[in-house]
Image (cartoon, rainbow, N blue to C red):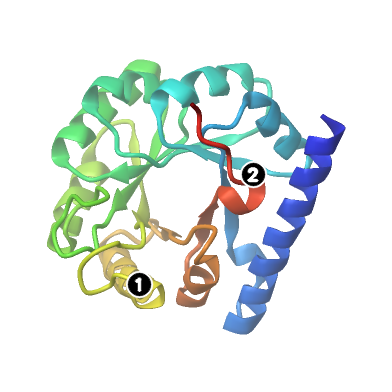
Amino acid sequence: MTDRRTQLAENLARVEERIASACIAAGRKREEVTLIVVTKTYPASDVRILHELGVRHVAENRDQDAAPKAAECADLSLIWHFVGQLQTNKVRSVASYADVVQSVDRAKLVTALSAAAVREERELGCLIQVALDAESGERGGVAPDGIEELAAAVDSAPGLRLDGLMTVAPLAGPYAGRQRAAFDRLMEFSSRLRGNHPAANMVSAGMSADLEDAVAAGATHVRVGTAVLGVRPRLG
């Protein structure tokens, strides 16, 4: 465990240095960017170590992994983000532990999340996931022309709070391989969204390989997994 703690501390320090350097290069304050550590496939023991090291935001992309991990770490002061594509049959479970759902991309999901949040007597933060590939759906997300309609649905839904936008760097379409351009585009959508929803100022973009591009574009949150936790060997 000591070795793992040392490894995570060193990795976290390197990521912190990258974020700090990116903020300096972009003329931003370090506190403007929140690090979310994506702990998918890693055990609750790693989450506990990360908490000891000062991490407060963690993310998961599969409910079957997230639910037991969140339960095991319920005594810790953590903010849980759900970042994966979410099926409506998993919504009730996700609403029981997630503080923010970053992958809201359709009206049916908004309805299901609202009902679950009300049932759990919780308020769920929601990010509209924006698809920047040629066609919506490659990695989840709503097409840009659907952002405002979906945002309005979230904003008016009981139990939900519209926090902002999220994207995953696209693998296809005009922004493939152009992360900075993709994140700049997301910031344009964010500015437009804040015209009608001033409090929806969260912009989640960037991962281990491209967090500098996200910080340069203006992202408020970066989602980093591999650079902190390492590459997990494939099973089998």
Q: Which residue is mark 2?
A: 229
Residue depicted at x 46% and y 30%: 98
Q: Return the mark for residue 177.
A: 1
Q: Quadrant of residue 56?
A: top right
Real-space Cα separation, disc 1 to disc 2, in angstroms: 24 Å
Q: In the rendering, at what x and y percent does residue 226 appear?
A: 58, 49
The front one of 228 and 25 is 228
Q: CB atoms at circles 1 and 2 under 8 Å apart?
A: no
Q: Residues within 10 Å of mark 1 (few under 14, many from 20)?
A: few
Residue depicted at x 39% and y 34%: 124
Q: In the rendering, at what x and y percent does residue 171 appear?
A: 29, 62
Left or right, 131 with respect to 165, comes to left
Eyeballing the image, is 106 above or below 203?
above
Left or right, 5 with respect to 157, comes to right
Left or right, 16 with respect to 168, comes to right
Eyeballing the image, is 63 above or below 119?
below
Screen quadrant of the N terminus: top right
SS type, badge 2: helix
**Amino acid type, residue under disc 2 in the picture:** Leu
**Amino acid type, residue under disc 1 in the picture:** Gly
Q: Residues within 10 Å of mark 2 (few under 14, many from 20)?
A: many
